[in-house]
Image: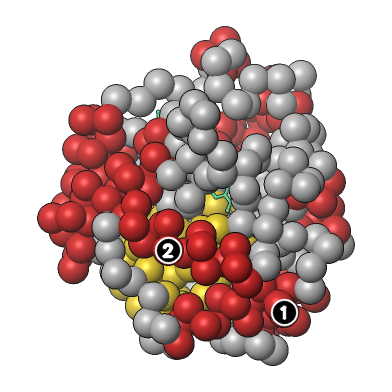
C-alpha cells in the first residue's frame, strides 16, 4: 500500500498518516525495546514517514531532573539507519511531571537547552518540526516563539509547531514566525478544537496534527476496563465510571466500519480526514501503537473516503460522550479548552 503525501504547511510535505511514538516507552501498557524498534521499522516500511515524539516521553532516570528523553533515544536507533526516510517531530516545554501547572518553561535559555538536548538524544543535526508542547502560562507565547524562531535561523529546526494552544495564542505566535502545525487532541470523541482552534489554524496557514486520534485506544473497541488498571487511563472518567456509556460511541463507529468493510480504528482515522476536507485544513493524524500489524491497519485509513452520511452519523456520536477529554490529573489550563 502506498500512503499518500500531503502538504501540511508551506514547505512541509509529509506522509498523510503519521505515527505517535509515545506509547513505545510505556504509558498504556508494557513495552519491549526490541519490539518497539521493530514497530518503528515497520512504520517506515508501511510508508508512514512522519514520526512524533517529545523530550518528556519515556521513563525518567532515577536521580535526574527534567524530561525523560528515553522515547527520543529509542527513535534515535531508527534515525541512525533511516534518517533520510523519516521526518521527525519532537517537543519541548514540559520540564517534569506531565500535568503540573508549574512544570512548563518557555524562556529563551530553556528553549535553546531543550533543543540541544533533543538533537543530541535523537542523534540528528536537524529537527523537521519542533513543537512547544505546553506553554508557560505566565510568559507571553510570543517570547517563546521568538526563541524557537532563532532555532530555525540557526538551522537546527526546519518548522515550528504548537500543541494545545488556544486560537488567540496561535494568532499571537503566528505573528512572530510561521507556524506549520498545531498538534492538539482531536477525534470523534474530542471535538472542542473545531470551534475556534481549527479555524485559527486554517487562517494562519498551519496544518493540523490530531493527537490521540483513536481516543487513546477507546475508539478502536479493543479496550477492556479491567486491562487499564496499570495504565495512566485507570480512574479517568471517560475510561472508568463512563466506560459503559461511552461504548455506545464505539458501537456507532463499528456500524460504519461494517458498511465499509474496515476496522473501527480505520473509521476513526478516516473521519479526521473527512473533517479536514470539510473544514478546509490539511490533517495528519498520529495514531500510536506498539504493534506492527496495527501500524499497517491504521495506514489504510489514509486511502478511505467516508460518505457524507457516514460522517454525519459519526459526528452525532459526540453527543453520546460522557466525561471531559481533560485527564483528571491535569489542571484545567493543561489543554486549550480549559483556557478558552
Ligand atoms: N501533544 C500532546 O500533548 C500529546 C498528548 C498525547 C499524545 N500525543 C501524541 O499522539 C500520539 C497518539 O496518541 P495516543 O497514543 O495517546 O493515542 P491513540 O493514538 O489515540 O491511541 C493509542 C492506543 O490505541 C491502540 N491502538 C492503536 N492502533 C490500534 C488498532 N488499529 N486497533 C486497536 N488498538 C489500536 C494502542 O494500543 P497498542 O499499543 O496495544 O496497539 C494504544 O494504546 C502519541 O504517541 C503522541 O505522539 C501528543
Quarter residue 195 falls in: bottom right
Residue in the picture at 48% in, 50% down = 55
Determine which of the numbered discs, if any, sits on residue 142 in the image: 1
Q: Where's the N terminus, which quadrant?
A: bottom left
- How busy is the neighbourhood of tag 1: few (under 14 within 10 Å), some, or many (20 plus)? some
Q: Is residue 92 above or below residue 332?
A: below
Mark 1 and mark 2 residues within 8 Å of each other at the beta carbon: no
Q: 74 left or right of 279?
A: left
Residue annotated with mark 2: 116
Q: 236 left or right of 88?
A: right
- How busy is the neighbourhood of tag 2: few (under 14 within 10 Å), some, or many (20 plus)? some
Task: Name, please, the residue furthest toward the left.
Answer: 81
Residue in the picture at 52% in, 29% down = 63
Provide the secondary structure element on which disc 1 rests. Answer: helix
Q: Nearer the viewer, residue 4 or 41?
A: 41
Q: Which of marks 1 and 2 is nearer the N terminus?
A: 2
Provide the secondary structure element on which disc 2 rests. Answer: helix
Residue in the picture at 34% in, 57% down = 120
Residue 184 visible in image:
no
Q: Is residue 28 above or below residue 200?
A: above
Residue in the picture at 44% in, 70% down = 129
Q: Is residue 156 above or below residue 187?
A: below
Q: 94 left or right of 14?
A: right
Q: From the viewer's perspective, is the residue at label 1 or at label 2 nearer?
A: 2
Instruction: Give the x, y percent position of residue 273.
Output: 49, 63
Amino acid at each position: 500500500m502506498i500512503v499518500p503525501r500531503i502538504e501540511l504547511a508551506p514547505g512541509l510535505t509529509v506522509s498523510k498518516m503519521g505515527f505517535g511514538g509515545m506509547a513505545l516507552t510505556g504509558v498504556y501498557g508494557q513495552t519491549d525495546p526490541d519490539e518497539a524498534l521493530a514497530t518503528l521499522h515497520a512504520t517506515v516500511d508501511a510508508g508512514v514517514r512522519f514520526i512524533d515524539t517529545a523530550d518528556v516521553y519515556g521513563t525518567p532516570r532515577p536521580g535526574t531532573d527534567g524530561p525523560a528523553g528515553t522515547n527520543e533515544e529509542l527513535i534515535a536507533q531508527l534515525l541512525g539507519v533511516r534518517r533520510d526516510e523519516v521526518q521527525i517531530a519532537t517537543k519541548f516545554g514540559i520540564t517534569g511531571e506531565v500535568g503540573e501547572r508549574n512544570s512548563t518553561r518557555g524562556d529563551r535559555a530553556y528553549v535553546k537547552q531543550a533543543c540541544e538536548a533533543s538533537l543530541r538524544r535523537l542523534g540528528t543535526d536537524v529537527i523537521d518540526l519542533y513543537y512547544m508542547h505546553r506553554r508557560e502560562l505566565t510568559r507571553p507565547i510570543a517570547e517563546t516563539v521568538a526563541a524557537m524562531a532563532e532555532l530555525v535561523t540557526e538551522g537546527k529546526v526546519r518548522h515550528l509547531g504548537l500543541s494545545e494552544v488556544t486560537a488567540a495564542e496561535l494568532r499571537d505566535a503566528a505573528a512572530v514566525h510561521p507556524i506549520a502545525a498545531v498538534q492538539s487532541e482531536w477525534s470523534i470523541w474530542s471535538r472542542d478544537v473545531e470551534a475556534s482552534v481549527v479555524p485559527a489554524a486554517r487562517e494562519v496557514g498551519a496544518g493540523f496534527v490530531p493527537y490521540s486520534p483513536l481516543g487513546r485506544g477507546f475508539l478502536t473497541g479493543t479496550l477492556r476496563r479491567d486491562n487499564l488498571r496499570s495504565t495512566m487511563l485507570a480512574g479517568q472518567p471517560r475510561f472508568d465510571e463512563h466506560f459503559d456509556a461511552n461504548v455506545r460511541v464505539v458501537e456507532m463507529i463499528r456500524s460504519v466500519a461494517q458498511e465499509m468493510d474496515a476496522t473501527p480504528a480505520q473509521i476513526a482515522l478516516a473521519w479526521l480526514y473527512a473533517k479536514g476536507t470539510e473544514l478546509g485544513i490539511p490533517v495528519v493524524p498520529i495514531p500510536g501503537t506498539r504493534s506492527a500489524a496495527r501500524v499497517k491497519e491504521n495506514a489504510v485509513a489514509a486511502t478511505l473516503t467516508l460518505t457524507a452520511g457516514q460522517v454525519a452519523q459519526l459526528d452525532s456520536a459526540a453527543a453520546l460522550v460522557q466525561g471531559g477529554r481533560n485527564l483528571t490529573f491535569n489542571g484545567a489550563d493543561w489543554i486549550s479548552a480549559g483556557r478558552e
